[in-house]
Amino acid sequence: MMAAPVAGQAAAARPPASAIAASGVRKVYSTASGPVEAVAEASFEIAQGEFVSILGPSGCGKSTLMLMVAGLEATTAGAITVDGMPVTGPQIEAGMMFQDPTLLPWRSVLDNVLFPVFMSRTVTPEDRARAEQLLRMVDLWPFRDKRPRELSGGMRQRVALARALIQDPGILLMDEPFSALDAITRDEMGLSLARIWDSSRKTAIFITHSIREAIFLSDRILVMGRRPSTIIEDVRVPFPRPRRPEVEADPAFNALYLHLKASIHRSPPLQ
């Protein structure tokens, strides 16, 4: 395990409260050919305002673990709490992003951002002001009246990011939101997310296959082994914020990249 020194922190400072905690979490799916163990055991804590990425081989249970945190999948064993409360159903307060932005094609960009509010209550002038603020943050305010088909893939994901933040959630859950984008657009989205996170400091879980993306965005990285998986390493990222693209030229960045890559490849074979 790699740990980074904490600079500028008083020795007597109390650690931040855990926003998300998982203890002995296990997930087994019933299939026609028999039970499939997706997650063998997962235990971790994520502090309030911490950005944590989850890395691991394809099919290791990363998305399943996040869906259990979101309350969209039930645990087979173990417990998950959010802000000290057990997760027993969908966490409607959490903002979520997926690989597919799932925008409503008949609605404008502005109305897609406001859609979670439409679904829960009457949209207020304050909601519209927040939607404008978020669209300006993701550089899409001039496109507010466009339909999703008129946008590029990266622009649609920026709409999805604004939508995930419209109700000012305490937790942001992101499941490979940039994986379908080209390399240049993906880098731009990473920079946009880092900038927005710096201004809001949401508690975040980010699932990715990109080691460099995880290092650039995260405070900590959880590495999962092959299915049936466990968390095999919990790595703190040592680089100060705000992050700039130049950090990738730091030799320590490349050393951490190689360490994480080796950790993933050392994980036990698929069972």
Image (cartoon, grey):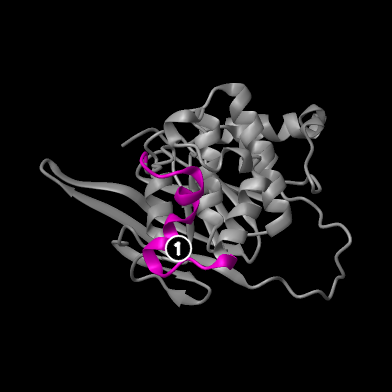
Q: At 62% across and 60% down in the image, what residue appears? A: 129
Q: Identify the residue at image location x=44%, y=49%.
A: 230
Give the percent coordinates (x, y) of residue 52.
60, 51
Task: Find residue 123 and report its horizontal and vertical position in percent.
Answer: 47, 65
Residue 125 inside the magenta-drawn segment: yes
- Give 212 or 119, whichever is nearer the viewer: 119
Q: Residue at x 40, y 45 (%)?
A: 107
Return the x and y of residue 81 as percentages of the image width and height: 46, 71
Residue stretch rendered in magenta on the structure: 105-126
Question: Would you name the residue on which mark 1 appears?
Answer: 117
Give the camera-side residue of 144 and 196. Answer: 144
Q: Nearer the viewer, residue 237 or 172?
A: 172
Residue drawn at (10%, 43%) of the image: 32
Our reading of the magenta stretch's main secondary structure is helix
The image quarter in which residue 48 lies: bottom right
How many residues crowd mark 1 within 10 Å: few (<14), some (14–19), many (20+)? some
Q: Quadrant of the C terminus?
A: top left
